[in-house]
Image: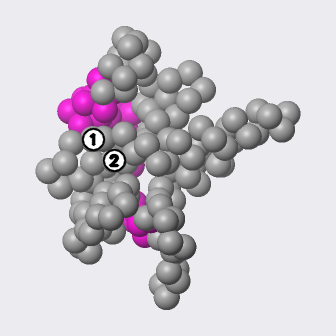
């Protein structure tokens, strides 16, 4: 399960290999990110972007922010302006964007937040939804 979470988080929304065209109606994808530096636990606790992600998740779940755990926070170079979360029918500048990949844990659930440039952290619902579906499939398998 942890390997699946790591794969989904690092792959995020992975782009099809060059020369391949996604199927019509398929969700857009982005190329893999380049990790720059892992943010240690102490600095993550004081990082205003990480704190903003924690507050957002706590608000979404209607729970105290103290119950949200930082599973990982790392600086990354997103390969384009989609920040690893491309949306249908949108075009993005194809330039690297420095940002953060933040993984938050609430109980057994992981939530992925992306930020970069002047964009504050936002929930990457594509990655979070994929992980949730994969976990449900594994629970059904057991």
According to the picture, the residue beneath numbered tag 1 turns out to be 121
Question: What SS does tag 1 mark?
Answer: strand
According to the picture, the residue beneath numbered tag 2 turns out to be 114
Q: Are marks 1 and 2 in contact (CB under 8 Å)?
A: yes
Question: What SS does tag 2 mark?
Answer: strand
Tell me which numbered mark, 1 or 2, is placed earlier along the sequence: 2
Residue plotted at (37% across, 23% down): 60
Measured along the vertical axis of the image, is residue 87 above or below residue 45? Answer: below
Residue 67 in the image: state x and y as whole percent.
44, 15
10 Å crowding of disc 1: few (<14), some (14-19), many (20+): many
Residue range of the region highlighted in magenta in the rendering? 29-55
The quadrant of the picture occupied by the C terminus is: top right
In the image, 41: left or right of 137?
A: left
Circle count: 2
10 Å crowding of disc 2: few (<14), some (14-19), many (20+): many
Residue 58 in the image: state x and y as whole percent.
36, 20
Q: Dividing the picture into quarters, in which one does residue 124 lie?
A: top left
In the image, 107: left or right of 66?
A: right
- Could one spot residue 14 in this view of the protein? no
The quadrant of the picture occupied by the N terminus is: top right
Residue plotted at (24% across, 37% down): 49
Q: CA distance from mark 1 to mark 2?
A: 5 Å
Rendering colour mode: one colour
Q: Which is nearer the eye, 47 or 129?
A: 129
């Amino acid at each position: 399960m942890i390997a699946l979470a790591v794969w989904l988080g690092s792959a995020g929304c992975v782009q099809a290999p060059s020369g391949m065209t996604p199927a019509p109606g398929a969700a857009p994808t982005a190329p893999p990110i380049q990790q720059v530096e892992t943010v240690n636990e102490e600095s993550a606790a004081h990082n205003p972007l990480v704190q903003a992600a924690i507050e957002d998740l706590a608000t979404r779940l209607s729970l105290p922010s103290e119950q949200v755990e930082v599973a990982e926070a790392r600086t990354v170079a997103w390969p384009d302006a989609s920040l690893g979360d491309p949306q249908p029918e949108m075009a993005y500048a194809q330039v690297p964007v420095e940002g953060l990949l933040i993984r938050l844990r609430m109980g057994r659930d992981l939530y992925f937040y992306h930020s970069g440039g002047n964009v504050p952290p936002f929930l990457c619902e594509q990655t979070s939804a994929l992980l949730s579906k994969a976990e449900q499939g594994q629970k059904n398998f057991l």
